[in-house]
Amino acid sequence: MHSKLLFLVLLLLMPLVHAAPTVVTKDDPVLEKRVMDLSTHLRCLVCQNQTIADSNAELAVDLKNQVREKLRQGQSEQEILDYMVKRYGEFVLFSPLVKSTTWLLWFGPLLLLVVGLGVLFAVLRQRRKMMQRAPALSADDHARAASLLSGKEGEGHS
Amino acid sequence: MNRFLLPLGVFIVLVIFLWMGLSLNPREVPSPLINKVAPTFRLPQLHDSAKTIGPEDLRGKVWLLNVWSSWCVTCRQEHPLLVELGRQNLVPIYGLNYKDNRDDGLALLKSSGDPYVLSAYDREGNVGIDWGVYGVPETFVIDKSGLIRHKFIGALTPEIIQSKLIPLIKELNGA
């Protein structure tokens, strides 16, 4: 009984053990916030679909330390981004810059939407024209259609 | 017939782009430092922490900076090639021992041979970041005026050394 209780207590304590190392106790929460904010704009180059804020890869940790160090030295956010771009290229920016080579990337989806709407309206208009051009039904046709619908005319394809 | 041509055309263009995409390596991020002045540093030497080394000491020479570490498996694969290249005396190879333990680094050089004229010891990896290093190994080619002329990302291979590295060094030395 005792050992079962002990086991249960230990089991319940497990999350604490796991959580302990991730608790960050940094002396300056304002600086830490700036580091994290800026880090969300920088791509982790070894885990390319993550920002360095999300990543615990060694390079990401190093880059965060660099960001922290430079902020501490009084550099502005833009200066640090410029530094990173000079070292690692524009790819290091998590959202690509808006410039002539990235216009297609930024506005391509909008372009597709406009083209899609254009095609949709063209097709709808053509269809309406076809409906208008379709010959009106004669009285005989109406009578036959009515009988078909009521199911009295048993012959045919059924 | 005609109404199939447009979707078919779109499909073919798509296939061509996807096909091209297959041969691209997303891990290779081109360095913006190419044809720029090599970032300066002053680091202790691996063998002798009392002495330092920096790019300024190497002005007027074509040289290689090979970023390596004892914990890096790919570096170990590359290592014999560097030793061989060092023996040929075509170009001085300098090492940047990146985020390594000094003793581990020295032990590797002792057991596998030391291709480097000197290795700089970058314990914290800050010089690495300054040079845009995001994985080891990386090899930079620096020309006589101190410009970075090429960066090889990942391990060098015999093919790369023969077809790219050696011709580039000959060209830079001739100029």
Image: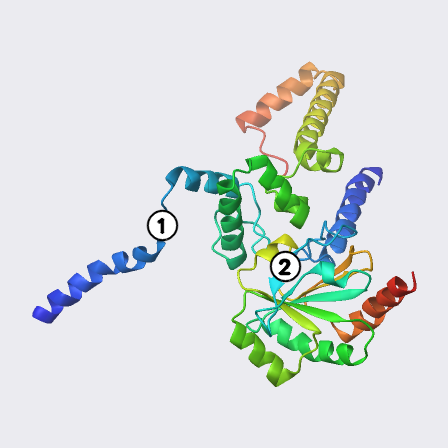
Q: Which residue is mark 1?
A: A24
Residue B42 - label: 2
Q: Nearer the viewer, residue A89 or A124?
A: A89
User: What residue type is disc 1 on?
Assistant: Val
Q: Residues within 10 Å of mark 1 (few under 14, many from 20)?
A: few
User: What residue type is disc 2 on?
Assistant: Arg
Residue at (77, 71) in percent of width and height: B92
Quadrant the N terminus of chain A occupies: bottom left
The chain letter for the residue carrying disc 1 is A
Residue B153 horizontal/vertical position (percent): 69, 62
Q: Quick check: A113 above or below A134?
A: below
Q: Nearer the viewer, residue A76 or B49?
A: B49
Residue at (50, 49) in percent of width and height: A64
Q: Quick check: B88 above or below B164?
A: below
Q: Is residue B91 left or right of residue A73?
A: right
Q: Is residue B10 left or right of residue B27?
A: right
Scheme by which the image is coloured: rainbow
Quadrant the C terminus of chain A occupies: top right
Picture quadrant where residue B58 is located? bottom right
The chain letter for the residue carrying disc 2 is B
Judged from the image, the secondary structure of the residue bearing numbered disc 1 is loop
Q: Is residue B134 left or right of residue B165?
A: left
Residue B105 horizontal/vertical position (percent): 57, 75
Q: Nearer the viewer, residue A153 or A86?
A: A86
Using the rendered image, report if marks 1 and 2 lie on a common chain.
no
Residue at (79, 51) in percent of width and height: B35
Residue A131 horizontal/vertical position (percent): 71, 20
Q: Nearer the viewer, residue A117 or B29?
A: B29
